[in-house]
Image: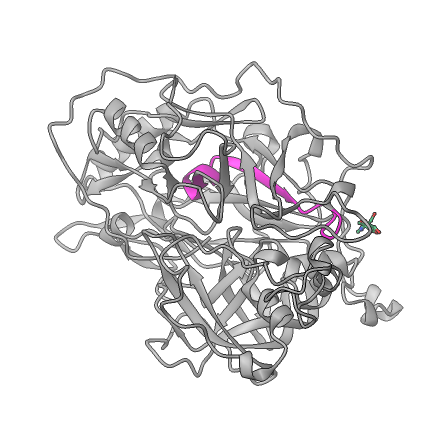
């Protein structure tokens, strides 16, 4: 989640010892003792019990051309991935963010720096204001940013899925770099309880409370954890404490409000619009060696050719009330709810060696990771990252060296493709690369994950996000399914990319930006495990002009390489 652009990487060249290692990827590890969760008896079937909007479910509507269930992704130099979202009458690209739960779009009346020639902004013509406003804060202590503006309702949709009366924020002011990266806002794909808009609508009883929070509110600068303390659980029913007064919503009211005030995808599920409470993401690669998986968001089903049985499924972390989670409802006293797309990781390996556990968190906190498409890096504990750098022999390495950072999840190893492990450090030379790693806050209070694993990892897997039963997770467990898509010759492909950069691209890896398509793009066959493959950019699209300005161009965008290597995003 959580946003913060323009983090300059510090590049320490150092006397980088050459590590005499080209470790073999240990993909497809032969052991798989992880116990996949039991899947629904019928695996997710092709969706489309549309129309989603039940009140419109007239036969005439059903007879329309088949509605789409998947949509292609735009990719701004592998730093942000976006998808076209309908808000009111506006169709505009929003950043795909599994780490947050709110949908916001820049209003055309926004006050600062919002002029855009590239993406449509939201004119608010059909916006129904609620009288509330939110300040959405993103980031951890390394990267805090915000976006603020009024909350209201409008039609919202993705691909052919539309809902009336979706609460969104029409952002008037932000210091995020969303616009600069070719998007008009953020599409949060998380759970209702992590939605600031949902929370505000639930606990705010009067317009007098509808003030924008103070900019320096206490959680700013740390990971923003939802405050669910005002929701009355079973035990707090009897207390008449300060926070448990009669104006506080009960957990029953909170659960009921998911369907009306929740984020777009949970509402689609709760209104019965989707065949299965699932979305799946594959991310393409637009740097280093263009191609990889087809960039696609599938909603309500897995893409054709990918079976639920082929994925390894792992449950999400649930947060107890003591850990800040939602209380259980009367009718199901043992419920424990997830807050975000966070799964247990068994261990982390670098170049085949198991890394030590972080000493910065107490060992009784289960090791977990947030899988976050809104994060352009792999963020982890400072001491473990130090161990990686030590093993690497410094902060940089030779780009042709294939290094493998791998996360063991559900008993299987999921490597980061060596082509995605680092970025070239300087322009006009691929002799040095810098790992795509950054420090994040240790778990403790608030979120309990140690790692926030972003796009370098998510480019290397096909990932399915299964919400399960949103109101009664014990009935259908929320989980994530993963399938590694790193090809067995990834190291050779990296070396070929380095040779190509040296031979024809003046020592630069290719870097392109693709606008979000309005449909799902045709794939060029399937790659590892049947996951659809993106087209590799034909050489004509990666022209390169030599000289001091050294830019790589694509039909869609011209991006300075330095932008690519100095910008990160963490939503
Ligand atoms: C979720 O579980 C509750 C309690 O068993 C049930 O009433 C509800 O229908 C379930 N929701 C879905 C979508 O299956």
Question: Which quarter of the picture shows residue 53?
Answer: bottom right
Instruction: Judge left or right: residue 539 versus residue 413.
Output: left
Residue 332 placement (x, y as % from top left): 79, 47
The residue lying toward the viewer, choosing from 354 and 523, is: 354
Of 161 and 136, the residue lying toward us: 136
Q: In this picture, which residue range is highlighted in magenta?
A: 451-472
Q: Is residue 545 visible to the viewer in this orientation of the structure?
A: yes
Residue 412: percent from left, percent from top:
55, 23
Q: At which x and y percent is residue 184?
A: 45, 68
Above or below for 23 versus 127 = above
Q: Between residue 156 and residue 363, name the one nearer to us.
A: 363
Q: Position of residue 264 (x, y in %)?
A: 64, 62
**Colour scheme used in the picture?**
one colour
User: Residue at the location (34% across, 64% down)?
Assistant: 180
Does the magenta portion include 233?
no
Q: What residue is shown at x 73% (from left), y 56% (from top)?
A: 269
User: Residue placed at 44% from the left, 38% from the top?
Assistant: 450
Among all residues in the image, which is located at the extreme right? 59
Q: Quadrant of the C terminus?
A: bottom left
Left or right: 219, with 266 as reference point: left
Can residue 178 be seen here? The reply is: no
| Residue 469 on the magenta segment | yes
Q: Residue 528 vs residue 417: left or right?
A: right
Q: State whether residue 326 is above or below residue 117.
A: above
Q: How many marks?
A: 0
- Viewer-proximal residue, 90 or 332? 332
Q: Is residue 437 left or right of residue 82?
A: left
């Amino acid at each position: 989640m959580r946003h913060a652009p323009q983090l300059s990487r510090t590049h320490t060249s150092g006397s980088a010892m050459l590590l005499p290692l080209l470790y073999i990827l240990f993909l497809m590890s032969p052991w798989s003792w992880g116990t996949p969760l039991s899947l629904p008896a019928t695996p997710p079937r092709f969706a489309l019990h549309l129309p989603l909007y039940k009140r419109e479910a007239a036969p005439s509507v059903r007879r329309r051309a088949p509605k789409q269930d998947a949509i292609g992704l735009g990719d701004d130099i592998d730093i942000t991935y976006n998808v076209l979202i309908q808000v009111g009458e506006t169709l505009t690209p929003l950043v795909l963010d599994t780490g947050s739960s709110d949908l916001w779009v820049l209003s055309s009346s926004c006050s600062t720096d919002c002029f855009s020639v590239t993406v449509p902004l939201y004119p608010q013509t059909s916006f129904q204001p609620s009288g509330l406003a939110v300040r959405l804060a993103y980031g951890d202590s390394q990267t805090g940013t915000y976006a603020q503006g009024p909350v209201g309702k409008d039609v919202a949709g993705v691909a052919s899925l539309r809902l009336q009366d979706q609460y969104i924020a029409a952002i008037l002011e932000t210091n995020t770099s969303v616009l600069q990266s070719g998007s008009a806002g953020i599409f949060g794909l998380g759970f209702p309880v992590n939605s600031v808009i949902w929370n505000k609508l639930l606990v705010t009883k009067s317009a007098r409370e509808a003030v924008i929070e103070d900019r320096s509110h206490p959680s700013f600068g740390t990971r923003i954890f939802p405050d669910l303390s005002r929701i009355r659980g079973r035990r707090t029913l009897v207390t008449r404490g300060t926070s448990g007064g009669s104006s506080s919503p009960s957990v029953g009211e909170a659960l009921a409000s998911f369907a009306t005030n929740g984020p777009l995808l949970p509402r689609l599920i709760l209104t019965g619009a989707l065949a299965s409470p699932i979305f799946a993401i594959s991310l393409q690669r637009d740097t280093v060696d263009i191609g990889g998986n087809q960039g696609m968001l599938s909603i309500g089903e897995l893409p054709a050719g990918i079976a639920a049985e082929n994925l390894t499924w792992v449950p999400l972390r649930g947060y107890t009330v003591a850990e800040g989670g939602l209380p259980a409802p009367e009718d199901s006293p043992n419920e424990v709810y997830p807050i975000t797309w966070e799964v247990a990781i068994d261990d982390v390996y670098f170049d085949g060696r198991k890394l030590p556990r972080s000493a910065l968190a107490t060992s009784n906190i289960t090791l977990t990771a947030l899988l976050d498409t809104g994060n352009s890096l792999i963020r982890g504990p400072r001491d473990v990252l130090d161990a990686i750098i030590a093993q690497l022999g410094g902060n940089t390495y030779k780009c042709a060296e294939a290094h493998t950072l791998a996360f063991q999840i559900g008993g299987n190893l999921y490597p980061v493709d060596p082509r995605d492990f680092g970025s070239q450090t300087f322009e006009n030379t691929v002799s040095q690369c810098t790992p795509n790693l950054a420090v994040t806050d240790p778990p403790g209070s608030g979120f309990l994950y140690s790692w926030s694993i972003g796009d370098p990892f998510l480019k290397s897997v096909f990932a399915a996000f299964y919400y399960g039963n949103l109101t009664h997770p014990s009935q259908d467990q929320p989980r994530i399914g993963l399938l590694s898509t790193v090809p067995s010759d990834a190291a050779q492909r990296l070396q070929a990319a380095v040779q190509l950069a040296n031979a024809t691209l003046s020592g630069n890896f290719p870097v392109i930006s693709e606008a979000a398509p309005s449909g799902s793009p045709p794939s060029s066959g399937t790659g590892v495990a049947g996951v659809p493959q993106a087209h590799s950019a034909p050489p004509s699209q990666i022209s390169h002009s030599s000289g001091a300005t050294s830019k790589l161009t694509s039909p869609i965008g011209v991006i300075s390489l330095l932008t690519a290597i100095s910008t990160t995003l963490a939503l």
